Amino acid sequence: MKKNESPVFDSINQCHAMTGLPVVDIRRAKRGGCTAFASHRVNLFALLRWLNGEGRRKDVHVVDVAAAKEADLLESAALKKQKRLEKDGQLVPSEYVNQVLRETLLPVRQRLFAMPSECASNCNPADPQHARTALQSWLETNMPIMAAGTLPDQCPYCGQRNKKIVDK
């Protein structure tokens, strides 16, 4: 081989083994119309010019047909399952769940955030028994308020009866 002559490999695999170029990129170049290929031979300089120039501008999208069909079947099965569950009333819309959580947990949240300011005036670090009494008093006052948080008697979408969140 002369000094400025391009190496020519007998196959894509030989080109990959000798240069370290990924086989995927070499095949992408061949599918993309690179002139480096002739009779299963690979001209390295032409391949590199294409990969560094035209190949970057003209990305060929390679699709594995079997994987695409499998992904499509899985997606179709998931959609069918979701529709079946919705039809059977086994799925509850997120708006309903958000509403129930808001109605149930909002009073608890409000009481918990109010606890420090309500108890601070009654707590004295010099008298820990007084602090325990103040906290116990706060709990006795507010636990019934928090325990009153209940779900609606019946789900409006599926008709299933609900239980209380906190059983007394």
Image: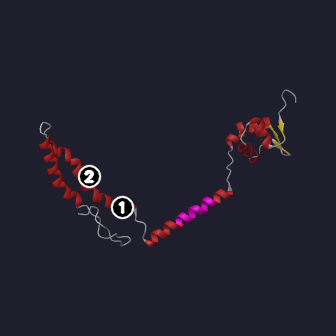
Left or right: residue 138 versus residue 19 is: left
Left or right: residue 29 versus residue 148 is: right
Residue 121 visible? The answer is: no
The answer to which of marks 2 and 1 sits earlier in the sequence is 1
Magenta stretch, main secondary structure class: helix
- For image coordinates 27% across by 55% down, the residue present is 106
Q: Around disc 2, counting alpha carbons within 10 Å, would you say few (fewer than 14), some (14 to 19), or many (20 or more)? A: few
| Mark drawn on residue 109 | 2
Cα distance in 3D space between marks 2 and 1: 17 Å
Q: Name the residue under label 1.
A: 97
Say which amino acid is labelled 2: Arg
Percent position of residue 144, x then y: 19, 59
* Magenta span of residues: 70-79
Percent position of residue 82, x then y: 49, 66
- For image coordinates 74% across by 46% down, the residue present is 27
Can residue 17 be found in the magenta stretch? Answer: no
Name the quadrant of the N terminus. Answer: top right
